[in-house]
Image: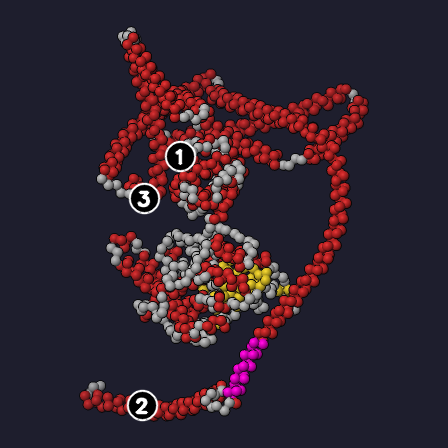
Amino acid sequence: MAESVEKTDEISAIDADEEEKHFQKVVSAFLYYKTLARNRIRRAFYSYGRLSATHKRLVPKYEAHLAQLLKCIDRNDALIRQILSGCEHLFNNYSMSSNVNQSSTDQDSLPPPSGVTSMDMDKVKTTIKQFVRDWSEDGQEERSICYAPIIEEVKRRFPLSSTTNSDDSTNNISSVQILVPGAGLGRLSWEFARLGYTCQGNEVSLYMLIASHFILNKCSQVNGHTIHPWILNFCNNITNDDQLRAVQFPDVNTASLSPNSRFSMSAGDFLQVYTESNDWDCVATCFFIDTAHNIIEYVERLWTILKPGGVWINFGPLLYHFEDIPNEESFELSYSDLRSVILSCGFQIENEKLPIRAGYIKNHRSMLHYEITNMVEQLKFIVEQLKRPPFNRKDYNILTFDNLTNNQLLQVLTDVFAVIDPKEQAHKIDIRDEEPDKTATRHMNTLKMLGYRPKLDTDVNTFRQNLVSGDKSVVFPILQWLLEKVPEHKERAYLGRYLSRTEVPTEFLSDPEIAEQYERCDELMEEFKEIHHAYKETTSTPHTIEDLRRDIKQLEDEKETLQKRLEKQKPRVQKVPAAQIELAKNYRQEVEKEAKLNTMKQDLQNAINQLEQKIQRLERQIADQRSSSYDQSPEAIMKRMEEENQVNSYLVTEKFPKQLSQMKTKLKYYEEVTSNKALGQTELTSYRAKISELNSAINKLHEKRVLIKDPTADNLAVFRQQALIVARRKEQAAERLTQLRAENDVLEKQSGRGASINGGGGGGVSSLMKQAGHIPQGEEFQRYVNMLRSKGNAYKRKRQELNDMTAEIQLLKRTEELLKEQVEQIKSRMSMEERKQGIEGYFSTQERLEQLSTMKMEQDELKGKSLDEITNLIKTLNTRISSKKAELDPILKEVKPLRAKVQELRSEYEAKKTKYDALNANFESSRSTLESEVRGFYDEQYAQESRFHTLRAQMLIHAVQLKRANDEQSSYMSKDKATKSTRELLNKQISDYEVRIKANRDRQKATKDVHIDGTKQMKYWRDLLRMMELKQKLATGDS
């Protein structure tokens, strides 16, 4: 358990009356919390009451939510009063006001107490939230980021050693003294004391001191108290429950410290309390140094109070507390300037980490989070990596790189992509010659291929917009991620070119051939992965010359062994008759044939199983097609299928080949252009002139041909013209069909996305305009209306086309049904003919056999291809092995003379190593002896120092007691009766109390006598009153 918060001698510089006023103001601020919170809820009630009835119906549960907030405020107020009730005499010189245990229900509308400001109420709210950060499970994440590194560094610098008590129990008590300024509610100080260090926390805020006194001395049950820290946060709440959320504390038993633990808290300003030099082994500051008016004074004082060789561990930002407070002195330094000051004072910076993301009293369920971080190290890393090969951007430094424009940053990102994926020509471009959308799409696809993942709280649309604009908050993390692992990203980019899956629509996969090819593509990808993995293992395995020599020797030994075994077996074989040898040979061949036949049988069985699975899949597809074409005529289906077949055949045979040839021609032209050197302005002008001359010559020749040719001589001109018109119409129809299919896919995706986002509501264009924050006016609005009209007309045309297609679909379905009926009739007639001829089932069996033979041919063809591939691969491997052996032969010849030299050096090394080990052993034994002696001297020194401090403290205590005794004796023996001694004052008070007690007893006795007489008189008067009432009833005749 922590010691009581003690009032240090240094804080006595403040006048006692001012201290008492400040203490009363802090208590009043705590007590005013309920009034402040209820006033805020009353304002919310007032705003809700001013809403219209329609708006109130939209939020029917809001009033009940406010009522729940009032209950939470009452719970917080009860906890605050419980906190205050335990510190009536916190500093042993004054007490709190008597209204701590009184309810404030009747004071809700009162103004703040005298002297209490809004800043004081903010400190109260911060203290309530500090319970979450320091002593709850919700604050574990913040503590692991802020406190854990400090604790681990202390444990590394000052290791704990276990000692054994008299009862054979272990004890981790360290004489290392740790100071924690700005301790807050004392969790970091408590953790050090729990580990076994001597620790003292320092805090100047009475708000924190009162709360820490409660948590450290009055809380022994884990999660025994509940607080609602977020009830006054009306902004950035995802749900109402997040605002009402309760937090239990403490998450540990604060009374679980060892009885031998040395832990205390001191109150007062850091600069006034700690003035003694060479007093502390370690000072740990967490979110503290920016609370100074002059931060240089903090650094100098830290250097003063630390012992020689002491350690200062700091964590936190430079959010100077007095920077924006009027009439307050505040001296702010940048981190680089502060670093120079720290070094100038004498400190040596041994460990420095930047940036570190950390929050302070963060509500994890809020929509807005503030984090403290630093981009200097990020910029430094990016610039250093870009200066190295293969980038070689020597002209960059932190300032110039930070001042790059957004387009320049995007160009840098493109250059990095070009290095990572050198085979992708799209990255080798100046982004000024590329449209921003294409640049963003290219960057997004590359990041997706490389597996980049933004932060979890980043919206995809926001990320894309920032990437398009080249925002630093997006580009810098991407560059850091890319430059951290360039080789891994290069390999991923190489694999991405061969392992990127082609998205095939589901309706196409219903085609067996396409599905089979798709599966084959997946198999090849898996095979490529295995081969690449084997290649990586082969190339990554370090094969030294010694290993290769060892393998060759092992093979030669095996060869010799086999030759010896053959020599031994030859005489035995020669004695065996030739007939038996021939029988054994035939038997071995038959066994091999049997194994091959079993393998072929297994392969055929696997093929049959695959074919059966394929047949089952096809039958399921046929069943699905039949179920989907229920109540549709086969004629209509056949007609639709024929038309679709004609369209597809036209696209495949005419349109796509023509487009492909055009694309190849363009590609050829582009390759020629890229292979040639860049043209200047004069060359471009000359080429344009030549093109215009050629065009004019072509036009003249065409006019001459028209004049010479007789239009009546060509009898096929009309038909040729009609064919041309038909071909153009077919091309237009095909283009239109392609566009309609693409638009249909886009509309289906948009409709699905719109239904999920808008809940089926309309207003697509208007919602986009609202999101953009722009309302069209004037001519722009007229253009918008015209655009809507054109879209409406286009929608009507597409709707008509859709109706026509639906009619065609119905017609084709009917056609299909008729054809199926005809097929069934043909099958029935065939079965009747088969029964007549006595060969029933011949037709179906023959059809099944033809299908199986076709499938077998396909499988044999695939097997042949696979065998050819394996054969080629084996030949290639054998060739490579032979070439490697040929390359190793001259190397082995060179290695032979070096082997003898290595043996000589090894023997010399072993001799010198033996001598070194002997000398090292002597040195180690001497060093261990000296270390044990030095350690004993240190322990003795620490023991003497602790005894000195103990005796010094006892001496001061005895001096104070002696002074008080001397003062009392001098006052008692003094002849001056004006100044009375404490004994006389106490004796006088005792006599006064005795006189007052005697007088009170006499008054009590007199009062008791009077009370007895008064009771008798009251009884007489009651009896008389009853007699008079009876006489009155008899006189009036009432019964």
Image quarter (top left, top right, bottom left or bottom right) of the C terminus = bottom left
Residue 604 appears at what percent x and percent y? 56, 26
Which residue in the rendered view is the most extreme toward the left? Answer: 1036
Front label number (2 vs 3): 3
Name the residue carrying label 2: 1019
Residue displayed at 57% across by 25% down: 869
**Chosen colour scheme:** secondary structure
Kind of residue sitting beneath label 2:
Lys
Given this view, does label 3 or label 1 mark the residue nearer the observer? Answer: 1
Dot 3, crowdedness within 10 Å: few (<14), some or many (≥20)? few
Give coordinates of residue 810: x percent, y percent: 32, 27
How much space separates mark 3 and mark 1, taking CA atoms? 29 Å
Could you tell me residue 224's position as x and y percent? Answer: 47, 64
Q: Residue at x 32, y 57 (%)?
A: 62
Based on the displayed image, in which of its 4 quarters is residue 927 positioned?
A: bottom right
In the visual, does 183 lie left or right of 883? left
**Label 2, label 3: how many angstroms apart (C-alpha)?**
89 Å
| 354 on left or right of 700 | right
Q: From which residue to which does the magenta span run?
A: 955-972
Residue at horizontal 36 percent and vertical 36 percent from the top: 749
Numbered disc 3: secondary structure: helix
Q: Main secondary structure of the magenta part?
A: helix
In the displayed structure, would residue 923 be above or below residue 460? below
Q: Mark 1 = which residue? A: 432
Q: Of discs 1 and 2, which sits in the foreground? A: 1
Residue 966 among those drawn in magenta: yes
**Left or right: 222 as drawn, with respect to 718:** right
**Dot 2 lies on which element?**
helix
Q: Which mark is residue 771?
A: 3
| Extreme residue in the top direction | 713
Residue appearing at x 20%, y 86% in the figure = 1038
- First in sequence: mark 1 vs mark 2: 1
